[in-house]
């Protein structure tokens, strides 16, 4: 009887301790970041910047996000503003939401965040705006919030381009594949009379890899672009099975595990469409590891050295080159306009180019030093 009474009290105690520790961690983060910011705002510094912005990226170690930050940083110098990548300051111990709270408490001049459509993110963006801190959503949007602008890609147009590339692969690789099936024909007494031949056409299996933790409409719009383009432009009597597979992108290991599961299935996709740099790299590695080069066609995302090398080696069919530096530049331009005029454009859309075997030499000769 006494044990039953003490049990909930013990749980309540542990819960209280956990909440207290989390609060202390956040407060310490705010204090550390505030001290960090002061280095750029001291009045005694003749070279101090007019504005101090922070960026909260999706994955600061990826080439894509490094390029985004470089574009923002360089444009910040032009605008006499300093752009700091908060992920590099606090590492992976803090979530995007934690870093949003730290940035708000530190009273920075603007926040650039890789957002999503979660309620928590909406509340944090609105809290920042209420504190007169403009927020730019980057790559992932939060349409329900009071953010001043969104900088991203034309998801539907990119989806249409992926759809056209799917159809081009089918045409060049002569998909769907057909196989002759030989079947015996028997009479009513069970005596075999002859063999019959039938041409069996297998459907083209197209798999689009989605991010489990991306809670925004961009993925859905992109997939709609793929599906509509395939349905409207494919040849008659051609069967295409389009499937959407969610990938656990908590870390690199979980992505590798999720993609490995795809290659362990009996029916491996003919075409895999990747919507981020990490998935592209992991699928490329899986195709090589499972000896599926030439059997599985990859449509990738971004133009890292690894991806360019894979295109040159005919392992990746094509990739969408997103002007990541331009995205970063647009973020700072938007914040500058907002501080100057009190408003800015609702959307900034980055340029997209397609890289394939036909033009890969231009990018390799352009200075991408491959391993």
Image (spheres, grey):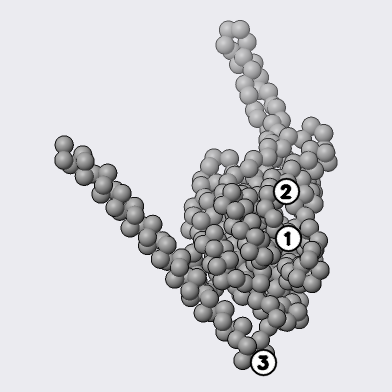
- Label 1, label 3: how far apart the Cα atoms are: 31 Å
Marking on residue 148: 1
Q: Earlier in the sequence, mark 3 or mark 2?
A: 3
- Label 3, label 2: how far apart the Cα atoms are: 47 Å
Which residue in the rendered view is the most extreme toward the top?
A: 188
Residue 240 in view of the camera: yes
Marking on residue 275: none
Q: Secondary structure at mark 2?
A: helix
Give the image location of residue 347, x and y in percent: 78, 58
* Rendered residue at 77%/55% (across/down): 154
Query: Can you tell which of label 1 and label 2 is closer to the viewer?
Result: 1
Give above or below for 96 relative to 205. Answer: below
Q: Secondary structure at mark 1?
A: loop
Q: Secondary structure at mark 3?
A: loop
Q: Are marks 3 and 2 in contact (CB under 8 Å)?
A: no
Question: Image quadrant for the C terminus?
Answer: bottom right
Q: Earlier in the sequence, mark 1 or mark 3?
A: 3
Residue placed under numbered mark 3 in the picture = 46
* Rendered residue at 83%/41% (across/down): 233
Q: Nearer the viewer, residue 322 or 138?
A: 138
Which residue in the rendered view is the most extreme toward the left?
A: 2
Q: Is residue 73 left or right of residue 1?
A: right
Query: Around disc 2, counting alpha carbons within 10 Å, would you say few (fewer than 14), some (14 to 19), or many (20 or more)?
Result: many
Give the image location of residue 122, x and y in percent: 62, 53
Residue 256 in view of the camera: no
* Rendered residue at 73%/60% (across/down): 148
Give above or below for 176 relative to 162. Answer: above
Marking on residue 222: 2
């Amino acid at each position: 009887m006494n044990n039953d009474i003490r049990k909930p009290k013990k749980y309540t105690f542990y819960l209280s301790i956990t909440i207290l520790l989390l609060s202390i961690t956040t407060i310490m983060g705010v204090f550390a970041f505030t001290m960090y910011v002061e280095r750029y705002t001291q009045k005694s510094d003749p070279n101090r910047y007019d504005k101090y912005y922070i960026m909260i990226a999706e994955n600061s170690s990826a080439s894509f996000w490094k390029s985004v930050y470089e574009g923002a940083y360089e444009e910040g110098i032009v605008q006499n503003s300093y752009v700091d990548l908060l992920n590099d300051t606090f590492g992976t111990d803090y979530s995007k939401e934690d870093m949003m709270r730290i940035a708000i408490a530190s009273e920075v001049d603007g926040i650039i965040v890789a957002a999503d459509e979660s309620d928590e993110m909406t509340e944090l963006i609105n809290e920042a705006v209420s504190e007169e801190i403009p927020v730019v959503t980057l790559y992932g949007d939060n349409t329900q919030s009071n953010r001043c602008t969104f900088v991203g890609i034309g998801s539907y147009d990119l989806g249409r381009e992926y759809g056209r590339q799917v159809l081009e692969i089918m045409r060049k690789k002569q998909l769907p594949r057909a196989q002759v099936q030989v079947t015996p024909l028997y009479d009513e007494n069970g005596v075999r009379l002859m063999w019959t031949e039938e041409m069996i056409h297998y459907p083209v299996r197209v798999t689009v890899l989605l991010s489990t933790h991306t809670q925004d409409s961009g993925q859905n719009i992109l997939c709609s672009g793929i599906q509509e383009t395939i349905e409207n432009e494919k040849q008659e009597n051609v069967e295409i099975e389009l499937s959407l597979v969610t990938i656990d992108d908590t870390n690199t290991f979980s992505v590798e595990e999720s993609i490995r599961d795809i290659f362990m299935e009996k029916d491996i996709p003919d075409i895999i469409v990747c919507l981020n740099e990490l998935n592209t790299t992991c699928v490329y590695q899986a195709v090589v590891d499972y000896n599926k080069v030439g059997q599985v066609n990859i449509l990738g995302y971004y133009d890292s050295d690894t991806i360019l090398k894979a295109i040159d080696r005919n392992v990746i069919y094509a990739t969408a080159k997103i002007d990541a530096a331009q995205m970063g530049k647009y973020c700072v331009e938007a914040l500058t306009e907002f501080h100057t005029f009190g408003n800015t454009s609702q959307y900034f859309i980055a340029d997209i180019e397609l890289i394939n075997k036909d033009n890969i030499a231009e990018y390799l000769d352009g200075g991408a030093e491959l391993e």
